[in-house]
Amino acid sequence: MTTTLEELWRQVEAITPPEPIFASTGPESLMLPVPLPVDMQPRKVPVRAWAAVGAVALLSLLVPTLLWLPIVAAVPLGIWTLATGSTRRVETRRRETALAEAGREHAALIQTVDAVGPAGFASIRRDLETTRHQHDVEVPAAEGRALAAFERTAAQQQLRTYLARCSIDRATIPGLGPSRRATLRASGVTTAAQVDGALIDTLPGFGPVLAGALVDWRNACTAAFRFDPADPAMVQNREEVLRPFRQRRAELTSLMAKGLGDLRLISRPPSKEVAQLGQRLAVTSQRLAQAQLDVAAIR
């Protein structure tokens, strides 16, 4: 038995979303991160050292023979400053790189968690709502427009076929004798489908009155026409028009069935997978917090 899209949708509505996935240890019980130890941070030149250099410089001003002393005292401190400054920049870049990597890892895991949690469930549900709207609204509207256009052209085609069967030779038209019928045949006018008043009026032996009589006969044939929707050619052509819309409905029903299966899976995720994601989330959260604190401590 074929399951309809409406039946599938009722099953979709009965499915409840999954519970959110949190870090397995819980945000409130995570170990608080601490910055790197002080002895791992680059040392700065003590203020007392620069004060001593300043004192030596002042002394050299009082004793001109000691002008070389500030230079001798400042050189090692300058070298110290450059070395420690370079070390600090390297350490800063290392910590910033670690922070960026921790951020990317945590963001990627959040996306994975969202995909198998309530956000992923909601995304699939929205897609299924779109599928249902296409099946119930968009496809029928397009089908109706195509069918209306087909029936208009089909009626016109059927009328042309009907008029092509109305032979002038078998018609009783006042003033139309054998010679004038022969003139019409020679001009290619043999059925009601070919009657054109303006053309007939120009033929030898014809005039407005006889041309009008032929047009009246054609109009009478047109009035007698009855559209036949059961005509075999009409039925076959109508089926050709409807076929792509039936195929589209079948495709949408298949999409709904697949989405229903995906929705069921995500609504009941394996407990082992949920536990693993919770553990990984705890690890990446802790790593990101640690990297943020390390960068803040060195800046």
Image (cartoon, grey):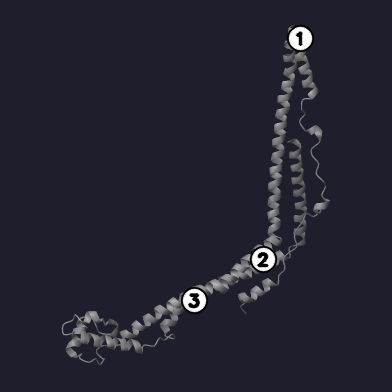
Badge 2 amino acid:
Asp
* Comparing labels 1 and 3, the label whose residue is closer to the camera: 1
Give left or right: position of 51 versus 248: right
Q: Is residue 202 left or right of residue 264?
A: left
Foreground mark, 2 or 1, reads 1
Choose between 119 and 108: the one closer to the eye. Answer: 119
Sequence order check, earlier mark of 1 and 3: 1
Label 3 sits on a secondary structure element that is: helix
Which residue type does callout 1 highlight?
Leu
Using the image, determine if residue 136 lies above or below residue 20: below
Position of the C terminus, as image quadrant, is top right
Horizontal and vertical percent for residue 254? 59, 70
- Mark sitting on residue 262: 2
Image depth: mark 3 or mark 2 in front? 3
Pick the quarter of the image with the N terminus.
bottom right
> Looking at the picture, how far across and down is residue 246, in whole percent?
52, 75
Which amino acid, mark 3? Gly
SS category of the residue bearing label 2: helix
Q: Secondary structure at mark 1?
A: helix
Disc 3: which residue? 144
Distance from the alpha carbon under mark 3 to that under mark 2: 32 Å
Per the image, the residue denoted by label 1 is 62
Q: Earlier in the sequence, mark 3 or mark 2?
A: 3
Expressed as whole percent of the image width and height from the top left, the position of residue 225 reads 36, 88
